[in-house]
Each structure stands twice: as C-alpha cells, then as structure tokens.
Amino acid sequence: MFPYFCYTAIFILGAFIGSFLNVIIYRLHTKEPIVKARSHCPHCGHILEWYELVPIFSFLIQKGKCRRCKHRISMQYPLVEGAGGILFLMVVVFNFPAIWQDFGWALEFSIFTKLLAFQFLNILYLWAVLSMMIVIFAYDLKHYIIPDKILYPAIILVICYKLFDFWSFINWDLSGISNLEFEVLKPLLYSFLAAAGALAFFLSIFLITKGRGLGFGDVKFAFFMGFFLGWPSIIVGLFGAWVLGAIIGIALLMTGKKVLKSEIPFGPFLVTGTFTAMFWGDEIIKWYFGLLGF
Ligand SMILES: [Zn+2]
C-alpha cells in the first residue's frame, strides 16, 4: 500500500512541476517575468482560479477550453503535466530500489545513511535535468529554437553534479565499497569524452551542411547530452534521436504534413533520445552486444 501512496504523491508532484514548466515555456517566449504575474488565459486575459490550475484535471473538466472565453487550450498543457508526472515517477522507480537491491541491510548504518542521502540528491538532480529537457522539447517543437536560458543552466548543473559526484565518492569514503580508484574517476572521464565526441560530431555536421541540417542549438545540446549520459550511453541517445527523427520525418513527408525542404526541429528527438538512454541505455547496449554474440 505504502509504495503506491508514494508513487501517487510523486506523480502529482511531477504534474505540478509540469504545470510550472508550461508557464516557463509560455513566458520564455512572451518575455513575461516567470514568477511575478498570475496565470491567465493567453486569449482573453482571464486570471485563473486555483481550481483552473489543477494539472491535467482542470483541462479535462473544462474540456480543453477557457472557462470564460471558451477559447481552446493547447494540448501542450496536459501533455507537459502528464509527462512531468510520469517522468518524475520513472526516475524514482528506476533509481531508488538500487540501494536496497545492491547493498541490502548488510551495510553499516553510517554508510547506509550516506548512500540514502546521496541517492536522494541524485533523484533531485535527475528531476531538475528532466524538467529542463521537457521545456527544451516543447519550446523547440513550438518555436524551432533551443533556449539558451534553459540549456546553459542545464550544462552547468550537469558539470557541477558530476564533479560533486566524483568529489563525494572520495570524501564521503564511499570508495570503501569498491576499492578501485579508477572506477571512481571513470564516470567523470567518460562524461568528458562523450561530451567532446558528441560536440565534435555535431559541429562537423553543422559546418558541412552550413547550418541547414542542424541548428547551433542542437550542437550545444549534443555537448550537454554527452556530459549527462556519458560513454557508452551517449551512443544510444544519439542513435535513438536519429532513428526517431528519420521515422517521424518520413511519416510527415508521406502524410504530406511537411515537404522535403520544411524545417523539422531536432531538439525533441535529441530529448527523447536522452530519455531513452537515461532509462534504458545499459539494457539496450547489453542487448545489442548480445545480438552480436559478445
Ligand atoms: Zn480565455
């Protein structure tokens, strides 16, 4: 019973964060202050009451329309809220049980509490990264640009967290669990390599196609992706983005929604690739090498 209560609470938290992300997506574009003004209908200016701001539910109850002017509300709102809820929950489900499974009850209490604190920080970090990627996904899809105001803080956060991760393993004496010094350095090193590799790869495409194939925002995002995912997950992330981009691109061409020269933003595919690698990167790599017979 208890886990389901927690899961529901986390989903609701994620949905509320999603609701806030919608505000950021909207106000990044209109350049309104993010926290100052109260939420209002973009069409008639009607100030929203608390019961019109309940994630997902308000949209469903109002049948996707503003209560006053009946103007349609974009599907972006419930979708971003739902994505927030589901992804917040996934981070916990995918990460939290590790501490029990890997180490169980066999640990000393002091190490156990440190690990617990560390895992909690890790979840907060992943929630923050996810939130920024949801904004980038929706914003790029809508406006064909990856906002630096979100991407730069994301890059800084990831670099700081990886450095902290490295530092804490040394200083919190968690290295007692695995005595290999190199094992501690490896994630940081692999993040640097993956970021440099992804940056070089995207920058070459950008230069060769003279910016027609990719935007410079995608080049910067690739650097972020490399640092966040590290090696070898970055391969899964980029490959996933490209496969998905190709499938959706062909589908849009075939249904006549886009022509060959239309611009299709690549950011949403990069974000989806990042999510895929983040949650299933290791499994996909194992499965792939299994296919090759390694
Ligand atoms: Zn309205």
Image (cartoon, rainbow, N blue to C red):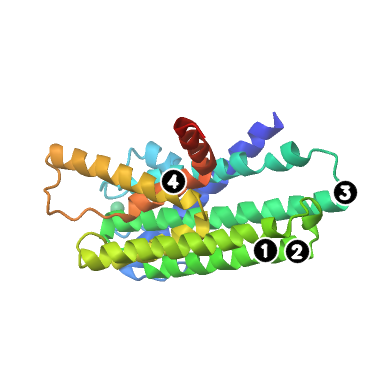
Which residue carries the number 4 mark? 236
**Where does the N terminus fall, quadrant-wise?**
top right
Where is residue 57 shown, x and y percent of the image? 44, 39
Which residue carries the number 2 mark? 170
Please say if the residues under marks 1 and 4 sit with CB atoms less than 8 Å apart.
Answer: no
Disc 1 or 4, which lies upstream in sequence?
A: 1
Q: Amino acid at mark 1?
A: Phe
- Element type where label 3 sits in the image: helix
**Alpha carbon separation for disc pair 2 and 3:** 19 Å
Which residue carries the number 1 mark? 166
Please say if the residues under marks 1 and 2 sit with CB atoms less than 8 Å apart.
Answer: yes
Q: Amino acid at mark 4?
A: Val
**Alpha carbon separation for disc pair 3 and 1:** 22 Å
Disc 3 or 4, which lies upstream in sequence?
A: 3
Please say if the residues under marks 3 and 1 sit with CB atoms less than 8 Å apart.
Answer: no
* Image mark for residue 12: none
- Element type where label 1 sits in the image: helix
Where is residue 268 shown, x and y percent of the image? 34, 51
Q: Amino acid at mark 3?
A: Phe
Structural crowding at the residue carrying mark 4, measured as other residues with C-alpha within 10 Å and reported as few (<14), some (14–19) or many (≥20): many
| 9 w.r.t. 214: above or below | above
Residue found farthest to the top: 1
- Element type where label 4 sits in the image: helix
Structural crowding at the residue carrying mark 1, measured as other residues with C-alpha within 10 Å and reported as few (<14), some (14–19) or many (≥20): some
Disc 2 or 4, which lies upstream in sequence?
A: 2
**Alpha carbon separation for disc pair 1 and 4:** 24 Å
Dot 1 beta carbon under 8 Å from ligand 1: no
